[in-house]
Image (cartoon, grey):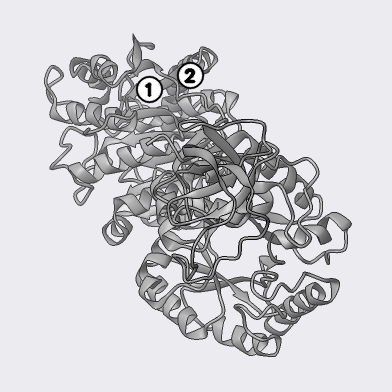
Amino acid sequence: MEYPRIEINLDFIRGNASALTTLCEKRGIAVAGVVKCTCGSPAVASAMLTGGVKQIADSRLENLVRLRNNGINSELMLLRSPMKSQIPHTVKVVDISLNSELEIIEMLSVEAVRQRKKHDIILMTDLGDRREGLMPQDVIPAVGAIIRMSGVCLAGIGTNLTCFGGVLPSLENMQLLTELAEEIETVYKIKLRWISGGNSSSLKMIIDGTMPAKINHVRLGESILLGRETAYGELLSGTEPDAFRLKAEVIESGTKPSKPEGITGLDAFGHIPVILGDNRNRRRALLGIGREDTVLDGLLPCEPGIKILGGSSDHLIVDIEDSGKSYEAGEIMAFNLTYPALLGCMTSSYVNKRYCGIYQEPQTSKIRIAGIPVSIGANRSGSELAPEAVCAKKLKEKLADSGYMAEDCGNIVQPVLYDASLTPKQKAALLINANDCLAQFTVKALDDNRFPLAVGGDHSIIAGILSGLRQRKKNLGMIMFSAFGEFNDEKTSPTGNLQGMALAACCNRCGLRMASISPAMPVENIVLIGLRNVDSVERKLLRQSGIKLFTMEDIDVLGMHEVIVQACRKLTHCTEGIHVSIGMNFADPAEAPGVLLASRGGVNYREAHLAMETLAGTGMVCSADITELAPVNVANDPTAEFGVELLCSLLGKKII
């Protein structure tokens, strides 16, 4: 249905978030954007993140699940202590939760250990408002118990004010919070990540410069959504108060006496109505929205001369006598909203939601494909035939079926073949020429607003595509699917094969350069998925590297969807996109037999597709390569066909 309808201006929300995060950052304070008033809207969360908030917070676990399932990969915060029944899902979905009950924290600890995760908590203290939180004298002993628990990490302490008792943030209670933090750090010799100094009611102190310096975190909802602080209800400079507008349809309009006639009793909500004024005839309108949808006295008519008289479950009654308009049936009336009214509208399934603003440039619909017939980095020949085999499986045509315009450039270099007689240094010299061509191809593709897709070749070609990507994207992430770590160097490699050093070379952890311009990928920008075959020395190097690793055991325990969610969450800071590198050996040989070096125990067909489908849903993928194919039958190779299917899933092909 068209009406009632709430219109949500995402540009205003983004602007409000930007103004307030800038204000807070100048004081050394990070902002969690609170979306509970919008029923956990992914669009609103995205607008807040675009505006600069560091985390997304909500008090309802269901909303946080919705956010995660809709591609919000930032750190998620649960704003209240989870119920016992919610513990497993809390640990699975939520990064950090506000807690004050030791029994609940202990249950979180046990569950986090079971899920092989670390769950952060902020310990809440009651500084006078009398909602949640330990009393100040109980905080230090509680911390002693918490830091002995496995699976949970005490990320900070916090407080909440104004929500129940109306107690305002003050220098006294904020100073007490900082003193508690300092005592915790001194007694237990730990460093707290967050000292969370409340909600939108704390903004007055931040603006005035009276917030203690140790407070470094606030949770802002109403101030971002409605442009006002909540201690005194003042509008905030640089913010837009009208990000939300309710529109309702008139269903009856006419002139009636202003007072009811007859014996009165209880109304539909058990109250005795009190209607003031004389009994003159006044023009009034009935609108098709009621208490089932919103808090009626929180509606603020946009046009002058309109007065809200009241309403029932399904009707809003307004006096329009002084408006100068007749508002006939079928006409639309607009309202601004207070926080309670907004909460009602956003949680009512009867109110249609319409989003506008934040033009998001669609993912590039044009793909440029390069074949890289290289096997110089491998342990045998065969991968130089992969581009031809992939082409035979009609990659270009299948991408076109998914709505892409694909440009196949064919092989952009001459074959660089496996040669066992060459030293690693000699192989690297030959490889550099091919990878430099791939880097140039990649730069040109990006400059032409094309999605670069490299079809190899052994995995050493990642140095080429990453070299090109990093020349244009300094804050790039990479998710690499591979059975092997590829993190040896020329001294630790048991074989001397370049493919086993490719990732190390891209991170400048290998003495051999594989492209003239090194990608110099930061290790914190890399996630490796599917690991199951690692040399003994390489295992130590990977553990010490800082690269986020997901082994096959992790996939078995967590499930592929959760692995991808965690991987993307790890790369949230990579604002210029994620490169996806698919080494076909990450799949089990039963699914992908035609690879350079097979390793049993890999992912199955559906797990592989789920990984690609989940990544496609994030909108973060900006480039890709597929490698390690060694087709047995170039004209009709099943592994090449599987690889083409995976690329189509990665680029958005859906079942329905």
Precedes in sequence: disc 2 or disc 1? 2
Please report contact status of discs 2 and 1: CB closer than 8 Å, yes or no.
yes
Q: Name the residue beneath numbered marker 1.
A: 454
- Indicate the amino acid at tag 2: Thr
Q: Does residue 118 lie above or below 642 as drawn?
A: below
Left or right, residue 575 beside residue 177? left
Q: Of residues 102 and 603, which is closer to you in this image?
A: 102
Q: Nearer the viewer, residue 465 or 574?
A: 574
Q: Residue at x 13, y 42 (%)?
A: 590
Q: Is the C terminus in the top left, top right, bottom left or bottom right quadrant?
A: top left
Circle 1 packing at 10 Å, graded few (<14), some (14-19), many (20+), is: many
Question: What number of labels is visible?
Answer: 2
In the rendered view, tell whether residue 7 sits above or below residue 151. Answer: above
Label 2 secondary element: helix
x%, y% of residue 285? Answer: 53, 41
Q: Nearer the viewer, residue 108 or 315?
A: 315
Q: Distance between the residues labelled 2 and 1?
A: 9 Å
- Does residue 9 appear in the picture of this structure? no
Q: Residue drawn at (67%, 31%), measured in percent from left and top?
A: 324
Q: Residue 234 carries which label?
A: none
Q: Is residue 143 visible?
A: yes
Q: 225 above or below 621?
A: below
Q: Residue at x 73, y 47 (%)?
A: 20
Q: Where is residue 504 in the image (x, y as percent from the top left)?
A: 48, 41
Q: Which three-letter amino acid code belongs to the residue tagged 1?
A: Ala
Q: How crowded is mark 2: few (under 14 residues within 10 Å), some or many (20 or more)?
A: many
Residue wearing tag 2: 442
- The N terminus - image quarter: top left
